[in-house]
Amino acid sequence: MLGNLSDLDLRHLRVFLAVVDAGGLAMAQHTLNVSPSTISIQLANLEGRLGFRLCERGRSGFRLTPKGARFTELARILMAAIDDFGQQARNMDRTLVGTLRIGTIGHLPFSENIRISQAIARFRQRDEAVRLELVIRSPRILEEQLLAGDLDVAIGYFWNRMPTLQFTPLFIEHQVAYCGAAHPLFSQAGSVTQDQANQHSWAWRTYPLPESRMEAPALISASADNMEALAILVLSGQHLGFMPQHFALPYQKQGLLAPLNPQRLQYDVTFHVVTRQQRRLNDITRAFLADLAAVHLDQNPG
């Protein structure tokens, strides 16, 4: 088994992870710029040090052994820690050093994307050496990743108000019910009643919206976990569905969508910036939140 790690061990670990990511020795040779036979020797040396086989490789293809799969996770953790150590060591003279992981839901309003980008620009003016990671996920996944510590900041709307998380209102999004051009209600769009809408099939989201006072309709024949998928269902003309007004507007201008009744079949939903509780925030997260708040204050001085 591995005792003290040498530079050679670390090189072999990186080779092993490159093979795993590539899905085999033949594909990894392009990444590593060495021949498959050389890679095979390096893997064999690593397995010799470990005392167990990491993967099956040969004519039958490449696959990890059970121990190899578990070892892969440990190797990734080690390499991430080494990379983080190197980054912090190189930037010890900086005030903020580390990683900031931000998650948002998809299809934010144009204005809010601009504000987030401005907050990032403002953050980059600080004395920092921070790696930014930005992901787009569903509200449910964002919440799970915050709780697991895989995200530092999330922006979206959230059903659960977990006591271990802090929710700060950011902006309000207007949601309206729409139908596609091929839907039977399209000719009545603008004055469709709730009873009329309830007689037709709906596409519904797989995650709840906390501010929605609309009860789920009886006829739900499709579901979607993101806005683009929901739009496809509504555009088919076979389903009704709620969408953000800003998101649906381009389709509406092309005559592909129409609001059923923008005065009645609508509601507002509040977006929040969500983090762990303040006492658990690091300096990097605090700095970004301050920059985000400053950008919003600059554009909304009242």
Image (cartoon, grey):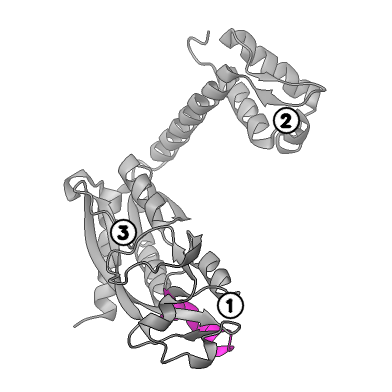
Q: CA distance from mark 1 to mark 2?
A: 45 Å
Q: Which residues are magenta?
A: 243-256
The first of marks 1 and 2 along the sequence is 2
Quarter of the image holding residue 105? bottom left
- Kindly identify the amino acid type of the residue bearing the numbered disc 3: Phe
Query: Which residue position is annotated with label 3?
Result: 158
Instruction: Give the number of the mark in front: 1 or 2.
Output: 1
Sort mark 3 into few (<14), some (14-19) or many (20+) by Cα contacts within 10 Å.
Answer: many
**Secondary structure of residue under mark 2:** loop
Label 3 vs 2, first from the N-terminus: 2
Q: Which residue is mark 1?
A: 237
Q: Nearer the viewer, residue 222 or 36?
A: 222
Q: How many marks?
A: 3
Question: Closest to the observer: 162 or 217?
Answer: 217
Earlier sequence position, callout 1 versus callout 3? 3
Q: Amino acid at mark 2?
A: Gly
